[in-house]
Amino acid sequence: MRIIISNSSNEPIYEQISKQIKAQILKGELKEGDLLPSIRGLARDLQISVITTKRAYEELEKEGFIETVQGKGSYVAGQNKELMREKKLNIIEEKLSRIVEESKALGIGFDEILEMLKILYEEV
Amino acid sequence: MIGIIKRDILLILSSKQTILLMLFYIPFLMILAESFHPESFYFVIIVLYTFLMSMSSFTYDISGKSKYIMNSLPINRKELVVYKYLSIFVYLGMTIVFAGVYLWIIHILGLANVDYFSLRVIKNTIPIVMMYSAVVFPVYIRFEPRIGQILSLFVFILFFTTIGNLSYTRDKAILKFLSLMKWEYYMAIALLLYLLSLLLSISLYKEKDI
Amino acid sequence: MDYILEVNNLRKEFKNFTLDNISFKLEPGYIMGFIGPNGAGKSTTIKLIMNLLKKDGGEVRIFGKDHEKYEKEVKNRIGFVYDENYYYEDLSIRAMKSIVASFYSDWDDDKFNQYLRDFDLNPKAKIKTLSKGMKMKFSLAVALSHNADLIIMDEPTSGLDPVFRREVLDILYNVIEDERKSIFFSTHITTDLEKIADYITFINKGKIVFSKPKDEVLESYAIVRGGLDILNDSTRKEFIGIRETKVGFEALTDNIEKTRKTFGDKVLIERANLEDIMVYSVRG
């Protein structure tokens, strides 16, 4: 499991953590039933506050990515295939809406974006 | 409480200053007093040494810088004070042994005519040491260490001049009074003062800012 | 809610200084950083908590018990490390340890010896031969060797180099893995707390400025930078502290939203760190 946080990013640390764990779950790197590091162990490894890791885990639990069992720890929750797909789509949708916003602000039209998307999809 | 006793003994034994003082004071006093009554000398040594030891123990807990450590340990203030009062008897015992051995060696070597043990003298030192502590301890607790030191020195000198004067007095009235006083009376007064002082010290220390 | 340390309306009056209305709470399993400039009252507060100074008002509960009524019981479970560690200079570490250990009911000699090894301290060394850093390490070893549930530290790392300070933080991280233990840590070196603290209590001139989760603190303050042209009397009031120079100003705000709305693009808004918050709050 891999979590790298940036101290200089404007994004709050708990969000960085939850995003990375989310991504690993969605990509399948973390499988259903996998045990996550304890809140305290993670805080110690990342050298951050316990409250921060707690918050990250709480977010993940709220969104259904993990389950916490009292006394045992947090596990990757069983991901319903459809729900997973939906979550993945949500991530992309969020990013796309930001792109749409900015394009409109910069005056770049829909067709141009579509063109760009096509090229990028083939290149990347 | 044993912990504190252990500590005090350890501290006294580990301080080079104190050891030197203890070793050289006896010969120093002997030189100072050209002629002395062996019993009086013995008496003075016992009281003096007990006094020195109990005062140095005070600095560790109540007036010295290490008081922060001591008072942060799990010990309550009442215990600390009670211990201080009881410890004078421990020091008395230690002094009797130490002085006994030291003076015995001097006696064996024929260096001077000294008393190295006298039950009668020891009996007399007990009320003196108790009364002395009763007066000095609360002062030490209540006032700044420096004032405490000056005052305790003052009391000490006062004590000895009084006793000295009393032992040479020709005043009939005083002599009569002194002859009536038995050791038991002295002890009773000393005990009373000692206990009152203990209560006073406990309440003083309880409210003190370390 | 069971707090491991609870301070309510603590008050102490001195001739030239008053500590007033000091209140904060700490739950088991967390670290609270206690920050403030020199002379703010940090050491005084800690001495009051440890009942070294007699309080004039308020209450202090540790492990749910009044700290005076249950003084001995409570102190048995507290490990303390002070700024000046006045142990008996003439004694060796070993001798000092045997004295201190006899007061605690739960002394763990194996643990202590392990710490001595980890810290590279010679048990036979006399305390007066130890450097400031080594004395502090010794204090820490003692504080952590009697199964204390609350560790109270008063400026333990002032005067010590960053390498050593980081080592101390690592040790504290290990301690806090046990969620029944808490650490209360006063310092004016805020960078130490930036990472490790869960809560921050900020004291200035004898009063508590705030006592909040560290994340919340860092999220609610920001450094604002801009040109002098946008400053006027009313905008100056928006900030907690301002530093004006010939080429612009730098200020601290505790209301990021409002600042954004008021100034929009004209200013640069950045994360403030604890030091910024402390300095601007104190200086104004």
Image: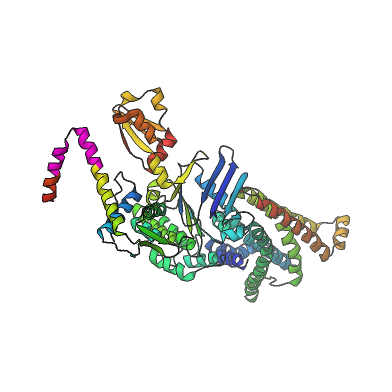
Residue A51: image location, x then y, percent: 42, 52
Which of the pair B63/B168 is nearer the observer?
Answer: B63
Which of the pair B110/B2 is nearer the observer?
Answer: B2
B177 vs B134, left or right, is right
**Residue C266 sits inside the magenta stretch:** no
Residue C90: image location, x then y, percent: 50, 62
Residue C219: image location, x then y, percent: 38, 42
B166 vs C233, left or right, is right
B66 vs B159, left or right, is left
> Which residue is at 80% across, 59% downward?
B189
Q: Choose top left, top right, bottom left or bottom right for residue C239.
A: top left
C237 vs B92, left or right, is left
Does residue C272 lie above or below C120 as drawn? Answer: above
Residue C58: image location, x then y, percent: 61, 45
**Residue located farthest toward the front when viewing the structure as drawn:** A82
Which of the pair C48/A56 is nearer the observer?
Answer: A56
Residue C274 seen in the figure: no
Does residue B131 lie above or below A105 as drawn? Answer: below
Which of the pair B137/B132 is nearer the observer?
Answer: B137
Say how many tags the image has.
0
| Magenta range | A97-116
Secondary structure mostly seen in magenta is helix
**Residue A105 sits inside the magenta stretch:** yes
> Which residue is at 32% across, 32% downward?
C225
Residue A43 seen in the figure: yes
Query: Which quadrant would the N terminus of chain B be assigned to in this image?
Result: bottom right
